[in-house]
Image: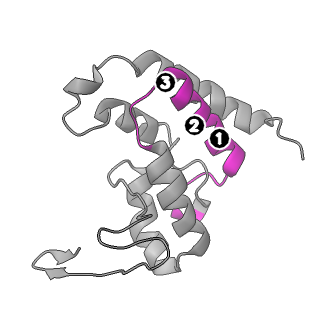
Amino acid sequence: MDFELNEEESAVSELAGQIIGDMSGSQNPEQLTSGYDEKLWRELAKANLLGISIEEPYGGSGLGYLATCAILQEVGRNGAQVPVLASIVMGAMPIGTFGGDILKSEILPKVIAGELILTCGLLEYDSTTSCPSARANKTASGWT
C-alpha cells in the first residue's frame, strides 16, 4: 500500500498545520469551558477541514481517509484540544459510510459547519462488552 500523500492531501496537511499551529496552545486547557478549543474548531470548519472526508453532496470534499489522517497528525503534533477523532472519525465518517440519505443530509452538514459534535458510544453504563444493553429514554426534547 502507498501511504504517501497526493497533491490534494498534502495541501490539506499544510492548511491544517498552518491553522492548528497558529491557534493551538492559545488557550490553557483548564480555561476551556466546553472541554475543547471552540475558536480553533470554528476555524477548522471555515476552512472545510471538518468535511474533508465527507462526500460532496453533503457539503464535504470527499478526499477520504488519508486527508483526515493528515489533519489528525497536525492535531496530535500541536496538542490541539479539538474533537476531530471523536466527531469526524468515530462519528461523521461512519454515518457517511453506513447512514441513510436522510440521516446524512440532516447530520453531516451540521458537523462540517462545526455546529454539531458527534461521538460514539463504546460501552454503556451498567453493561459489559459481552452483554450490551442499549436503552433509549424519551424526554421532552427528544431521546437520550
**Residue positioned 68% across, 50% down in the render:** 65
10 horizontally vs 81: left or right: right
Q: Which residue is mark 3?
A: 19
Q: Is residue 42 above or below residue 133?
A: above
Q: Is residue 115 visible?
A: yes
Q: Which residue is mark 1?
A: 69
Q: Residues within 10 Å of mark 1 (few under 14, many from 20)?
A: some
Magenta extent: 57-83
Q: Distance of mark 2 from mark 3, alpha carbons?
A: 13 Å
- Sequence-first tag of 2 and 3: 3
25 horizontally vs 139: left or right: right
Disc 1 marks which amino acid? Cys
Q: Is residue 121 above or below residue 8?
A: below
7 horizontally vs 33: left or right: right
Q: Is residue 59 visible?
A: no
Q: Which type of secondary structure does the marked residue at label 1 adopt?
A: helix
**Residue positioned 52% across, 68% down in the render:** 95
Q: Quadrant of the C terminus?
A: bottom left
Rendered image: mark on residue 72: 2
Mark 1 vs mark 3, foreground winner is 1
**Residue positioned 30% across, 68% down in the render:** 125
Disc 3 marks which amino acid? Ile
Q: Position of residue 71 (x, y in %)?
A: 58, 36
Q: Residues within 10 Å of mark 2 (few under 14, many from 20)?
A: many
Q: Position of residue 69 (x, y in %)?
A: 65, 41
**Residue positioned 43% across, 62% down in the render:** 120
Q: Residues within 10 Å of mark 3 (few under 14, many from 20)?
A: some
In the rendered structure, does residue 69 fall within the stretch colored magenta? Answer: yes
